[in-house]
Image (tube, grey):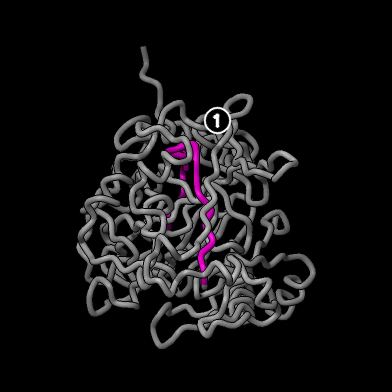
Amino acid sequence: MRKPKSSAGVRDALIAGLGRRNFLRAAAVVTGAGGTLLGARAAAATPPVTLPREILQPRKGPIPGRHYLPSTPEQVTWGYVPALDAHPVLRVRSGETVTVDSVSHEGILEDQGRDPVAYFGEHGVRRTDVLQDAVAIARDYARTPRDFDVDGPHVVTGPIAVEGARPGDVLKVEILSLVPRVPYGVVSSRHGKGALARTAGGGAPDGITLDEVMPPVATDGRPTGDPLRYGNVSVFTPVRRGRRGLASGVMKRGRRGEVTFPLRPFMGMMGVAFTRGSGPTDPALNSIPPTLGGGNIDINLLGAGATFYLPVFADGALFYTGDPHHAMGGGEAALTAMEGSLRVTFRLSVCRPGSGDAPEVAFRYPFGETPEAWLPIGLSDPDGSLDGQGGDLDTAMRRAVVNALDFLEQDQGMDRAVAYAYLSAAVNFEVSQVVDRTTGVHGVIPKEHFSD
């Protein structure tokens, strides 16, 4: 009997027979176990997500990648991204696939007790349904000291060195599949953070009053110095398995019942080493602000079937990932998405200048692509925490428009003035997020407008 092909093998065979564009168009509307059919999805659609029948503890369940990278205390940094001279925890060849068991920071942070068994147990989660790697990180992580008020929250897995990658190249990151590891997540709002945050000076930000700040000013316990008394709000969000195993997040709606919404998994953080830093906790390496190296980019269209292009700044590229999301609305208003651990499989490939394998913009700025759209990106402060910090959303919008114009002129052959008019007539620009110090905007350019 012939051995059945793996998902990757079937995917490659379909691409060979149909062509990549037709494969992606077909796959975008068909779903299968573990998320979407062979990892494809449409840009604007919300495809159904199915849950695995078991908790995906480390090394349990299907692991489709050629390589596997768990999130152990020795293979993650908590709150910081890798520097240009970081030591890789895994080496792969260009074009190979790797499956990463990512771990959400929500449920293990200091304001939640840094004890996921106790925290999730309070919400009815059995001990056996809490991820073992989350428990190990909360208990044993010691690579860097933790300062809740200064450090980023994210559990960052990596870096992965990709053979042959060198500065001036692009790392092409194909997101092949995303599977929820657990049937629950958390959405958090913290004092001094989020769209309605109180300013550092204690006042209200422009456009709202102190009474409209969230969480309410009266609950702000940060002067105590004890994160457990800060008054932060974390909303535990279970996942309901509906008919055919399709999954939805569930929140209470007061006396009127509940509100449900579909899961749309994606990795909030995908990046490459961008700066050297003076040590592993240098502010320039903080995991919160995205940079030209990507990182905490938080674009909810970069789910299964999407591709993310990153300019390379270090030998080996030094790719990392983290901040797994089960679902997120544009803007990420309250501070976090519905955060929940995911098993994600990537294909990592090196693109050389002049090869035509990546958009020209991607050699100097992160760029996204889905089966249905191109995603030019703009950041308000693309050097992250270097040389100060700026979060002006107008700046991010302008850069997204310029990058869209560059893409349309350089890769699609449009006259720049005509491209500018086209953007105004037919392209949506969306707020990626407003909560990561550096704000983000991305355009959504429909590919169907450019059909031959």
User: Please, what is the three-letter code of the amino acid marked with disc 1?
Assistant: Gly
Between 18 and 44, the residue placed more toward the observer is 44
How crowded pointer 1 is (Cα within 10 Å; few <14, some 14-19, many 20+) is rated as few
Question: What residue would you read off at disc 1?
Answer: 32
Q: Does the magenta stretch include residue 432?
A: no
Prevailing secondary structure of the magenta residues: strand
Q: Pinpoint residue 344: horizontal percent, then vertical percent.
A: 42, 45
Looking at the image, the residue that sits furthest to the right is 425
> Quadrant of the image for the C terminus?
bottom right
Answer left or right for 228 relative to 74. right
Indicate the position of residue 375 as horizontal and vertical percent values.
Answer: 59, 63
The local secondary structure at tag 1 comes to loop
Q: Is residue 305 visible?
A: no
Instruction: Say if the magenta span includes residue 175.
Output: yes
Residue sitting at x 38%, y 57%: 109
What span is colored magenta in the figure? Answer: 171-191
The quadrant of the image that shows the N terminus is top left
Q: How many labels does the image show?
A: 1
